[in-house]
Image (spheres, rainbow, N blue to C red):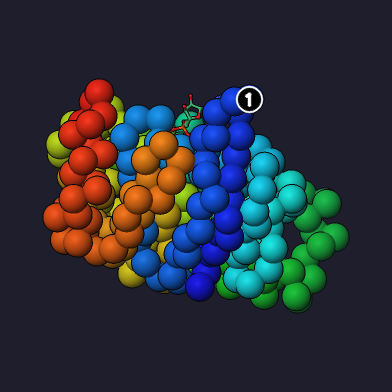
Amino acid sequence: MLLELRGVSRRFGGLLAVADLSMTVAGGAIHGLIGPNGAGKSTVFNLITGVIPLTAGEVFFKGERTSGLRPSEICRRGIARTFQATTLFREYTVLQNVLVAAHLVTTPGLASALFWSRPYRERERRARDRGRTLLEALGLGPVASQVADTLPHRDQKALALTMVLATGAELVILDEPMAGLAAQEKAETTSVLRRLREQGVTVLLVEHDMKAVMGVCDTVTVLDHGVRIAEGTPREIQTNPAVIEAYLGADEPGA
Ligand SMILES: Nc1ncnc2c1ncn2[C@@H]1O[C@H](COP(=O)(O)OP(=O)(O)O)[C@@H](O)[C@H]1O
Ligand SMILES: [Mg+2]
């Protein structure tokens, strides 16, 4: 298992937002985490990424305990947080953006000349190769030398995701990437998630849009009032009486 939550709880004052949650995310999967508003999805996201501390329980990533570590350390170990197009370097080319993300920028100047050693050149060559491979995989090969600012919005989002991958992230956690998107943009986001999976990246999709989740996920976990009420394939989840009850009973059913 790539990610494992063991008896994870989080209390906010008198409210138990996440209650003794155990779940595992298999490597290479798109795993959905759904539930009505207030179910605790974002809180789980924040607990995994270390943004807020756990009240109880433990989180393991690749068999090592990550709960209690700082967010930067958790990120360094390969868990990437949600991507945003606003993190792009607009005046850089697409490929340069990816190299920045991989912590490999070559600045032509004395300082870099000092480090112009063979191991460094070798490292940079590998980063460029990997960067180009990722760009091809996400459909950005043809625009690799274009300045990021000139890309259409859709390509900028794909570039932001490529940058996440260039950091070497093995698990990408996305919190409601479909929120506020039109149907066409949701479909594009879905295809980007599938391309990620093809690249061997695991996706934990925290999403309110049940329909979108059902279309793309391998496994779905359903939360209600901080409690895991169901887990299974999209087909199993859609016919699960407890899930139907949770959504029908909610003020706002899943879109
Ligand atoms: N920082 C916080 N302080 C107090 N209560 C919070 C905080 N964050 C979330 N909550 C509460 O925890 C519950 C779960 O919230 P959240 O994880 O955001 O749900 P979801 O993302 O599934 O809509 C909600 O009742 C919410 O009001
Ligand atoms: Mg939320």
Identify which amino acid the numbered label 1 is placed on: Gly
Residue 81: x %, y % from top left: 53, 46
Q: Residue at x 74, y 69 (%)?
A: 120
Mark 1 close to ligand 1, CB under 8 Å: yes
Give the labeled residue for mark 1.
Answer: 13
Question: Relative to residue 31, is residue 245 drawn left or right?
Answer: left
Q: Is residue 22 visible?
A: yes
Q: Residue at x 43, y 45 (%)?
A: 227
Q: Residue at x 46, y 41 (%)?
A: 226
Q: Residue at x 55, y 28 (%)?
A: 15
* Quarter that holds the C terminus: top left
In this view of the protein, which residue sits in the foreground, 96 or 194?
Answer: 194
In this view of the protein, which residue sits in the foreground, 252 or 14?
Answer: 14
Residue 244 lies in quadrant? top left
Q: Is residue 178 above or below residue 219?
A: above
Question: Relative to residue 186, is residue 142 drawn left or right?
Answer: right
Q: Is residue 205 visible?
A: no
Residue 54: x %, y % from top left: 66, 44
In this view of the protein, which residue sits in the foreground, 67 or 135?
Answer: 67
In this view of the protein, which residue sits in the foreground, 242 or 47?
Answer: 242
Q: Is residue 131 above or below residue 153?
A: below
Provide the secondary structure element on which disc 1 rests: loop
Residue 136: x %, y % from top left: 35, 63
Q: Is residue 64 above or below residue 75?
A: below
Query: Number of labelled discs?
Result: 1
Residue 222: x %, y % from top left: 34, 49
Q: Residues within 10 Å of mark 1 (few under 14, many from 20)?
A: few
